[in-house]
Amino acid sequence: MPDTNAQAPNVMWRVAPYFVVDDVVATANFYRDKLGFDYERLWGEPPCFTIVRRHRAMIMLRQLGAAGSMHPNRTPDPDDFVWDAYFWVDNADALHDQFQANGVKIVRPLCDQEYNMREFDIEDCNGFRLCFGHDTSR
């Protein structure tokens, strides 16, 4: 069986989590104004879908109509540190400072992990928990 994880030339994998939100416009603007993402457009009338992106990281946002449709991963146990998305970044410290200056809710401060990552968690305007970390082994 071939090694599917071997480095292959010109292969680039990307992923975009799909978050169901109560208000796609408010959420897209939160990601733009507080987290430094951008979006090109909103689809639907009224708006119901967009993709926010920062560098190569993307999140799809979808509004389903009735409020209360969203369910962050941590909903079953709000005290557990379960992420909805993890972002590998160049400098978690600088990003932490930027988010803090923008008034973003930081729910776990910067910390060094045994798996060689320096990371922190934030909560977005819907309660989705995002973790941002950089590799400390390099």
Image: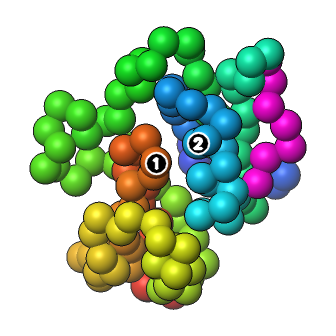
Mark 2: few/some/many CA within 10 Å (<14, 14-19, 20+) = many
Residue 35 lies in quadrant? bottom right
Residue 4: x and y, percent?
A: 59, 40
Label 1 sits on residue:
125
Q: Main secondary structure of the magenta part?
A: loop
Point 66% across, 44% down: residue: 28
Residue 57: x and y, percent?
A: 66, 53
Q: Of helix, strand and loop, which one carries label 1?
A: loop
Q: Of helix, strand and loop, which one carries label 2?
A: helix
- The three-letter amino acid code for the residue at tag 2 is Thr
Residue 82 position (above or below residue 50): below
Judging depth in this view, the residue of 79 and 69 nearest the camera is 69
Mark 1: few/some/many CA within 10 Å (<14, 14-19, 20+) = some
Q: Is residue 25 magenta?
A: no
Task: Tell whether 117 sits left or right of 20.
Answer: left
Residue 99 position (above or below residue 52): below
Dots 1, 2 in contact, CB < 8 A: yes
Q: Which mark is residue 79?
A: none
- The three-letter amino acid code for the residue at tag 1 is Cys
Q: Is residue 42 magenta?
A: yes
Judging depth in this view, the residue of 18 and 40 nearest the camera is 40
Residue 72 lies in quadrant? top left
Magenta part of the protein: which range?
38-44
Can residue 21 be seen here? The reply is yes
Label 2 sits on residue:
27
Can residue 15 be seen here? The reply is no
Residue 74: x and y, percent?
A: 25, 40
